[in-house]
Image (spheres, rainbow, N blue to C red):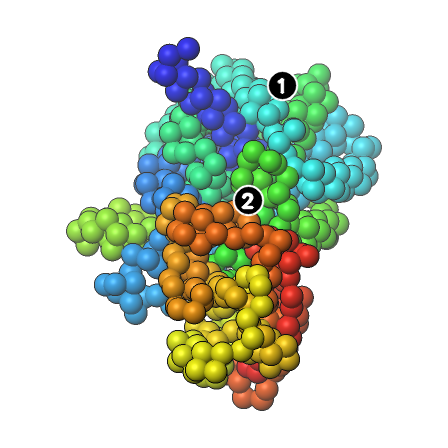
Amino acid sequence: MTSQQHKKSSLAALTLAAVGIVYGDIGTSPLYTLKTIFDPTHGLALNHDNLVGVVSLIFWGLTMIVSLKYVSLVLRADNRGEGGIMALMALALNSVAKVAGKWHFPLLLLGTFGATMFYGDSVITPAISVLGAIEGLEVAAPALEQFVVPLTIIVLVSLYSVQRHGTAGIGRFFGPVMVVWFIALAAMGVVNIMDEPSILNALNPVHGFKFLLRNGFVAFVALGAVVLAFTGAEALYADMGHFGKKPIRMAWFLVCFPALALNYLGQGALLIHDPNAASNPFFNMLGPWSVYPLVVLSTMAAVIASQATISGTFSMTKQAIALGMLPRMRVLHTSESEIGQIYIPMVNWLQLIVVLLAVIGFQSSDALAGAYGIAVTATMLATTILTFFVIRYRWHLPLVLCFIATGFFVVMDIALFSASTLKLLHGGWLPLLLGTALFTVMLTWRTGRELVFQNLEKHAIPLEAFLNSLFMAPPVRVPGTAVFLRGESDGVPHALLHNLSHNKVLHERVVFFTVHIVEEPYVLPDEQVKVTALGHECYQLSVYYGFKDEPDMPKLLALCGDKGLHFEMMETSFFIARQTVISSPGAGMAPWREHLFVAMSRNARAAADYYQIPPNRVIELGTQVEI
């Protein structure tokens, strides 16, 4: 096989995988979008002009928001190949650091807010997708309605229970299943368009504008439901690191966009032809014979959409931990070959609890649709604003061009967000509540860590001065290597002071180990390690990690060999100061936030565990830090 053929086959394989993982969420939107828009409670009349207008808005929304904004513009704003709002925030912060430092904190808040809204969205996606799929049973036999919620719960519990085994095994089926799903969407659309070709007028954007002008406030309310057609757009940016830009673009333009457009046109055609199908247009598209097969296929598609969201949440959490926004947690790797496939038990079970509460509390996809739009549009708006700072301060494009490029999308995002806020009391409070809670947790953790660093810095003993005075009357040196973990702003590690105070000895070789997290996803292996000799067989080992790099102490120590610092693991001891944070009055945070920080700090995963240091080589020494 020539290299050209190999490239083509790997591109095809990546495109197929992208169809399965990236577009699951947006691909299951036809299950509930039109059903929700024409829900009688919204007061939108079901007539020919309104149907053409709504389908026109959906078609041009997919074109403008997904094709133009995300696929054409935002995918260019990658952070060394990585996407997602956390990577975009890091890129924006990096971009403004030298020229517009005053924007640092506002952008940090905006990026964090957008990320927490993504978490809110990731709770609703599994609930609404699986509910929407299983609700097809009601179309087949109304008596089965009582089984919809129990069956949804069974599917979701099963899905979250298999997470710890990883998705490598079933992941290879995601692409083919979703391709079948998109082919089915397209075919169902074509069959109905042939019965009622007048729906093709919706391809003219004038009908969308006329619909908005004609219906006024009712159209504005409907806009909050039209948003449902664009949910999942953020996922295609977040998954860029796994697949690359080209496969994501090809999957969208060759498979997903045509299938979605045809299906929405087909649903519109069906409702012109048979307005009685409005109770569930999707499952009425092919008649009674198709309902059960469609329930099976759509449930599979919904599970795949949910899986992509769950994986995205794990990935986002890992980035947040590395960027210092969340405490260290247990992160398990589910694949030997795939570095990005991880499982975070705490996040998995917390998310399942909230998803089940959403299913039990809302009972139907219609009710949950009210909760959906706010989180999605808030994240979209945050992404657009962050993109402005990247194209202005990193790409250095003219200010006018930056305003034109992003201003157009800001107006659209604000319109959709405003329409979604009308649903605040009808479920919209759920993602906002979740997002606000998480936002508080992230800011509390970050502020608390800063207070800890300030305290340590205040009481720090400069390392070089300490070593000079220590070796005037050197302590007894014992065989072996001692590695002391030391923060960026620390002076002499507390563990070293305790060791000298209690054991009165020093190892014949001493290494001070400091980790620096840079605002980029990855650092090249030959740039990760920097060794500085401090004299008397003491060394400063500085390690540089990106926020998606995998901390791995044994691998790092092997890299040190190239820098002239060789380690024999069985002769190396790792001394770690286990910090116990104590809250003190007037520390700079509200008392309840101090208590929250102390609780998180005590339950955070140990540094030794996080850096994958062999447990039998670790010596932990306690130290108390006041905030």
In the displayed structure image, the side of residue 89 where residue 235 appears, left or right? right
The residue under the point 63% across, 34% down is 167
Foreground pick, 445 / 297: 445
The Cα–Cα distance between marks 2 and 1, rounded to whole angstroms, is 34 Å
Q: Secondary structure at mark 1?
A: loop
Mark 2, residue position: 312
The residue under the point 78% across, 32% down is 142
The label number, if any, that marks residue 374 in the structure image:
none
User: Which percent across, then down, holds residue 66?
Assistant: 40, 37
Rendered view: 621 above or below 386: below
User: Which percent across, then down, holds residue 331?
Assistant: 62, 50
Depth-wise, is mark 2 or mark 1 nearer the camera? 2
In the displayed structure image, the side of residue 193 where residue 528 appears, left or right? left
Q: Residues within 10 Å of mark 2 (few under 14, many from 20)?
A: many
The residue under the point 60% across, 61% down is 573
Amino acid marked by disc 2? Gly
Amino acid marked by disc 1? Leu
The residue under the point 40% across, 26% down is 250
Whichever of labels 2 and 1 marks the residue nearer the N terminus, that label is: 1
Q: Quadrant of the N terminus?
A: top left
Foreground pick, 197 / 88: 88
User: Which percent across, then down, holds residue 73?
Assistant: 32, 41
The label number, if any, that marks residue 286 in the structure image:
1
Q: Secondary structure at mark 2?
A: helix
Foreground pick, 541 / 598: 541
